[in-house]
Image (spheres, helix red, strand yellow):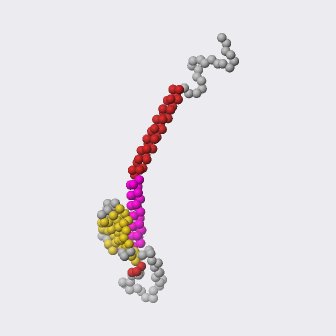
Amino acid sequence: MGLADGQSVVRWGIRRPGFSLAEAIITMFLVSLVLGVVAVQMHEYARVMSFSAPKDQVIVGSQLVIERLSTELNEATQFISPLPPSASSAGDIQFVKLNPNLQATRLPTSFPTAPPGTWNPYDPTWVVTVHYHLQGSTLYRDVAGLSSEPVAYGVTGLAFQWLGAKDLKIT
């Protein structure tokens, strides 16, 4: 028997190019397994991120409050309580600073005579007394005669301690 033109003989042991059905099924199973593992990992990542998001907001809020407090402490012209260098206070600090809402005039560059020993370079109308205090779990900022506002909620503790003449530790 002869073969007609264009026909070929398929022999056992000689493979045609391409994949067999078994190879395709095994490949699909492995790809599905890898995609399933990736999906589970992405789901766990999303769950962890949603759990930690409120904690991240608390940390950022705390950092902002401490930054605001430290900026105002650097602007202080006088501390009322706790007094430096050795006093400490739990949840309470009071100080005087220049009122940022006023445009204070500059002092003259030279004086005709030496100022008296009790001379204060700041006009009493230029300064405000700022008081940070903890009531329960809320930290308040009071500006004498101007405003009182809560700056942080859920505060579990706040302490101020002088470490030297100019170093204040906030914990």
Instruction: State the residue lying farthest toward the bottom.
Output: 112
Q: Is 73 covered by the magenta stretch?
A: yes
- Across and down, in percent, residue 113 comes to 43, 88
Would residue 11 be found to the left or right of residue 117 on screen?
A: right
In which quadrant is the C terminus drawn? bottom left
Q: Which residue is found at the position 43% from the left and 44% from the top?
A: 43
| Depth order, front residue of 125/114 | 125
- Decide: is 69 above or below 26: below
| Highlighted magenta segment, given as a residue range | 53-79
Would residue 93 be found to the left or right of residue 6 on screen?
A: left
Q: Which residue is found at the position 45% from the left and 86% from the top?
A: 111
- Is residue 165 shown to the viewer in this render? no
Q: Which residue is found at the position 38% from the left and 65% from the top?
A: 151
- Across and down, in percent, residue 26 comes to 49, 29
> Hey, which quadrant is residue 14 in on the image?
top right
- Across and down, in percent, residue 10 comes to 60, 18
Q: Main secondary structure of the magenta part?
A: helix
> Hey, which quadrant is residue 117 in on the image?
bottom left
| Depth order, front residue of 120/21 | 21
- Decide: is 146 above or below 32: below
Q: Is 153 covered by the magenta stretch?
A: no
- Decide: is 136 above or below 94: above
- Across and down, in percent, residue 64 comes to 41, 63
Q: Which residue is found at the position 41% from the left and 72% from the top?
A: 75
- Is residue 132 shown to the viewer in this render? yes
Q: How many marks?
A: 0
In which quadrant is the N terminus drawn? top right
